[in-house]
Structure formats: structure tokens, C-alpha cells
Image (tube, helix red, strand yellow):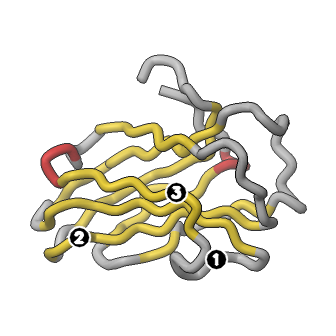
């Protein structure tokens, strides 16, 4: 399941009814979690509520930026989750690829694929592989 630390929160019960950046971004010059280069990391994504899953899926893009990201301009990894898997209380661990050069800010961009679905999501930066998943 990984762990959820308030300093590493990206989305906390964020309502996503249209394409959007995560409610929070992590500024690695201000937030200094005990990370070590080369240590596998991922994003723990939880579907808290799937109110109207009238969409074909959700594309989740992991973004770096020199300033707080507002869109999916600097995507370094993207994951597509089919609507059939976007069930309430379902958790996903999205790995951060190794060998990338990080920029100062980190965020997640949510892109609803075809349709007008609505989800409530939570996301955290977490060690990968997170145990129990």
C-alpha cells in the first residue's frame, strides 16, 4: 500500500471532473524528504470516489518543471488506467522511471479520456515498490 506522508501529498481528496494538475506540487528545494538518488520511487494513486465513471479512462502524467507545473508540458512518464479499473478505494502505484534528471517541482496531471467522468483522487510520492500492492 505504500505510505502517505503529508509532506509528499500531491492530491488529497481532489475532485477531478476535467483535465487538471494535482492540487499540490512538491518543491524539492523546500520539501526535503529523506530521498536518496537511485532509490526507486512511485506515485501512490487512490480512487476515493468514482461518482460518474462515464469516461473511457484516466491518463495520469508525472511532470517535472522548474516552476510549479500548471499543465502537462514536461511529462516524463504517463500511465493510462481504463475506466473499468477506476473503482472506489482502488489503489495504483505508478513507478517513476530511473535515470531521469529531476527538476525543482514535481506534480501529477490528470487527463480524463473521452467522456465526462468524475473522480475524487488522492496521490502521494512514495517508495517503490510499495509493499502490499
Residue reaching furthest front? 99
Which labelled disc corresponds to residue 77? 3
Residue at screen point 50% across, 50% down: 123
Q: Residue tagged by mark 1?
A: 69
- Mark 2 vs mark 1: which is more N-terminal? 1
Residue at screen point 67% across, 33% down: 40
Helix, strand or loop status at disc 2 = strand
Of tags 3 and 2, the one toward the viewer is: 3
Nearest the viewer among 30 and 49 is 30
Position of residue 106 in the picture relative to residue 70 (left or right)? right
Position of residue 65 in the picture relative to residue 83 (left or right)? right
Q: Are marks 2 and 1 in contact (CB under 8 Å)?
A: no
Residue at screen point 29% across, 39% down: 89
Measured as percent of width and height from the top left, residue 98 is found at 67, 42
- How crowded is the residue under tag 2: few (<14 C-alpha within 10 Å), some, or many (20+)? some
Of tags 1 and 3, the one toward the viewer is: 3
Measured as percent of width and height from the top left, residue 105 is found at 74, 67
Nearest the viewer among 16 and 39 is 39
Measured as percent of width and height from the top left, residue 55 is found at 14, 66
Helix, strand or loop status at disc 1 = loop
Which labelled disc corresponds to residue 113? 2
Residue reaching furthest top? 132
Above or below 53: residue 49:
above
Amino acid at each position: 500500500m505504500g505510505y502517505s506522508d503529508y509532506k509528499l501529498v500531491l492530491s488529497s481528496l481532489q475532485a477531478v471532473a476535467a483535465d487538471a494538475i494535482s492540487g499540490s506540487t512538491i518543491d524539492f528545494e523546500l520539501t526535503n524528504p529523506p530521498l536518496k538518488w537511485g532509490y526507486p520511487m512511485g506515485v501512490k494513486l487512490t480512487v476515493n470516489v468514482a461518482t460518474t465513471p462515464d469516461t473511457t479512462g484516466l491518463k495520469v502524467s508525472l511532470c517535472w518543471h522548474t516552476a510549479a507545473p500548471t499543465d502537462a508540458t514536461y511529462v516524463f512518464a504517463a500511465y493510462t488506467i481504463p475506466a473499468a479499473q477506476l473503482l472506489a478505494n482502488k489503489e495504483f502505484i505508478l513507478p517513476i522511471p530511473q535515470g531521469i534528471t529531476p527538476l525543482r517541482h514535481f506534480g501529477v496531471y490528470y487527463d480524463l479520456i473521452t467522456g465526462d467522468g468524475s473522480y475524487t483522487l488522492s496521490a502521494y510520492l512514495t517508495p517503490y515498490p510499495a509493499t502490499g500492492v
